[in-house]
Image (spheres, helix red, strand yellow):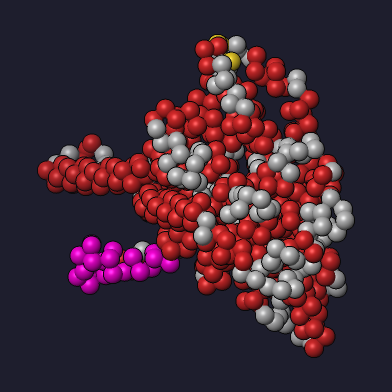
């Protein structure tokens, strides 16, 4: 940026711009957090920040069976889906990045098609199939579609990462006397791990976010995930409006994701841009 | 290799290449097998859960299939399509979806570009800006939608005061667009930022020396170079906006004529249990998405991601 002088004025301008970005990103988040800390008396005062913060709503949701159950469902379903999508996705991405075989382009095209798919188009047939084979309202009933829609994301992101691994290192290791397994295990795996890990985060976020499948394929707390449970939330006591309880539950399911993002910001940016732009 | 050089040596060389070729093709075949084998689980899952049900949805769309009257299932050809396409409710939802898609994507592009430039150029606190810009991407869509809903709820929200904008069609639509745009600008910005990183600084410097101001440098130098990134980002965001569901479900549930095509299909399928009509809507949504993708790729020349496979 040599042609632009880094003056004090310029720095002040950028500081101002940065504050705007921070406000943009955080205002809705701070608002829902502040709502979750309002007590019943001041809930409807319309203030942006709580006047007398209380943890009332958190106590309420953590004594609520439905919420705890939904939280367990969300974690379990998303972890299992991420794991399966990662295993299948890594295998396919490795093949696409490294091997020459017929139908490779078709596979890439099909997964692109699925990434663009209107998910609603699958709701009816899957609803019917699931009720017929008995996976409706079970963990499996959500894991299967989640894996399907996570696969294109995993394949794209991972094959972009795999393409950047210098495979000559593997050859060099073999020449130095390593067995193919050792070469793979000691040289390639450490290089591939960051990509696999990044993909895991992206896939997990995608599963954690799903709402359409979650409300279409669940009817009870047996498999309902938190995003779906939120929209059916009645709170622990039915006579009060569940606003604060929804806010508290919303904060709880947001925290893990935001922590992920804050810690692995660089990798997430790399994953999103490599998967999407480099194809 | 000519036939005149027939001799033991030549024969030996010939046989040698043949064996090498055979070994080579054997290696090739093994590679092909391995490639297909490694891809098999992913392909099977994708075909079983996406391709087969899609075909099934098309099939269902030709039937009168209402789970409330299960015995009345009958092949009615294009009957469902005629019903849906002559229904003002469908066209209203289609209009709503197009409005949200066009206006929403426009704001996403403009704000996304601004944010991308800020993330790319900022001098101080670059890490902080890049990290916090990811927050909307990471927030569960439903949570963000609740935040906006409560903010605009009468007497409750800090933005609403005495008004109740979510009970009115047009203000609801703008709030839906706001929540959609808020959530997706960071994603747009990231894709555009990846494009900005490809613009050579020297070129900008040269343009600057030739007297081009910031605006001219942006339009004449930066935009042409990052055009592919812009098109891919737009393609992704347009397709995604057209599928809008979560935000509307939470903000209005489609009340006051704010239902998108996905909300309408969901209402027919899951709430109404009318699989025939719901499937027909699903198929129409699928066709719309295919048309949008076709327009972007064929007419605007957006590179289909994955098509760049042979560039490496």
Q: Nearer the viewer, residue B174 or A91?
A: B174
**Is B251 left, or right, of A266 in this rendering?**
right
Quarter that holds the N terminus of chain B? top left
Q: Is residue A116 left or right of residue A74?
A: right
Q: Is residue A128 visible?
A: yes
Q: Hey, which quadrant is residue B60 in on the image?
A: top right
SS assignment for the magenta stretch, majority: helix
The residue under the point 70% across, 63% down is A40
Q: Residue B268: give x, y in percent of width and height.
A: 63, 28
Q: Position of residue A144 (x, y in %)?
A: 43, 42
Residue extent of the magenta highlight: A172-194
Which residue reaches farthest bottom? A8
Report if residue B125 lies within the magenta region: no
- Tell me: residue B251, above or below residue A273: above
Answer with left or right where residue A252 lies relative to residue A136.
right
The residue that appears at 66% across and 19% down in the rendered structure is: B81
Q: Is residue B251 left or right of residue B307?
A: right
């Amino acid at each position: 940026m040599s042609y632009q002088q880094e003056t004090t004025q310029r720095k002040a301008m950028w500081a101002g711009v940065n504050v705007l970005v921070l406000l943009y990103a955080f205002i809705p988040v701070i608002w829902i957090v502040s709502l979750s800390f309002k007590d019943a008396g001041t809930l409807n005062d319309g203030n942006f920040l709580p006047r007398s913060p209380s943890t009332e709503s958190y106590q309420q949701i953590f004594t609520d069976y439905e919420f705890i159950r939904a939280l367990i469902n969300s974690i379990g379903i998303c972890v299992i889906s991420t794991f399966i999508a990662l295993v299948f996705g890594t295998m396919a991405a490795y093949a696409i990045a490294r091997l020459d075989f017929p139908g490779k382009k078709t596979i890439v095209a099909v997964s692109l098609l699925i990434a663009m798919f209107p998910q609603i188009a699958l709701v009816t047939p899957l609803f019917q199939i699931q009720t017929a084979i008995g996976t409706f309202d079970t963990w499996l009933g959500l894991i299967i579609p989640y894996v399907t829609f996570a696969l294109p994301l995993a394949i794209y992101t991972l094959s972009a990462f795999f393409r950047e691994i210098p495979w000559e290192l593997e050859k060099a290791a073999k020449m130095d006397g390593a067995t193919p397994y050792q070469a793979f295990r000691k040289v390639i795996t450490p290089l591939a791990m960051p990509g696999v890990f990044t993909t895991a985060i992206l896939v997990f976020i995608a599963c954690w976010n799903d709402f359409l499948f979650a409300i279409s394929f669940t009817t009870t707390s047996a498999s309902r995930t938190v995003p779906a449970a939120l929209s059916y939330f009645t709170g622990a006591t039915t006579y009060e409006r569940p606003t604060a309880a929804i806010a508290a539950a919303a904060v709880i399911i947001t925290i893990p994701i935001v922590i992920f993002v804050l810690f692995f910001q660089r990798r997430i940016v790399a994953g999103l841009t490599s998967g999407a732009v480099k194809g | 290799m000519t036939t005149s050089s027939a001799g033991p040596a030549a024969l030996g060389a010939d046989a040698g290449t043949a064996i090498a070729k055979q070994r080579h093709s054997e290696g090739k075949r093994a590679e092909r097998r391995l490639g297909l084998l490694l891809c098999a689980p992913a392909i099977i899952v994708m075909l079983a859960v996406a391709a087969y049900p899609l075909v099934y949805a098309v099939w269902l769309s030709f039937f009168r299939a209402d789970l409330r009257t299960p015995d009345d299932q009958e092949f009615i050809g294009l009957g469902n399509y005629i019903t849906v396409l002559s229904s003002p409710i469908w066209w209203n939802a289609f209009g709503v979806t197009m409005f949200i898609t066009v206006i929403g994507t426009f704001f996403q592009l403009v704000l996304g570009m601004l944010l991308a430039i800020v993330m790319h150029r900022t001098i101080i606190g670059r890490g902080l800006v890049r990290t916090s810009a990811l927050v909307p991407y990471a927030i569960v869509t439903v949570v963000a939608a609740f935040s906006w809903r409560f903010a605009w709820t009468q007497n409750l929200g800090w933005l609403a005061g005495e008004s109740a904008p979510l009970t009115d069609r047009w203000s609801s639509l703008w709030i839906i667009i706001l929540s959609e745009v808020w959530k997706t600008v960071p994603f747009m910005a990231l894709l555009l930022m990846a494009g900005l990183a490809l613009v050579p600084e020297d070129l900008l410097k040269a343009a600057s020396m030739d007297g081009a101001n910031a605006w001219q440098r942006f339009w004449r130098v930066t935009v042409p170079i990052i055009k592919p990134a812009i098109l891919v980002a737009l393609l992704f965001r347009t397709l995604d906006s057209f599928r809008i569901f979560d935000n509307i479900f939470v903000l209005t549930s489609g009340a006051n004529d704010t239902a998108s095509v996905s909300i309408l299909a969901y209402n027919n399928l899951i709430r109404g249990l009318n699989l025939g009509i719901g499937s027909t809507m699903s198929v129409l949504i699928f066709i719309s998405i295919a048309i949008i993708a076709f327009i972007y790729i064929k007419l605007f020349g957006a590179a289909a991601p994955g098509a760049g496979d042979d560039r490496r």
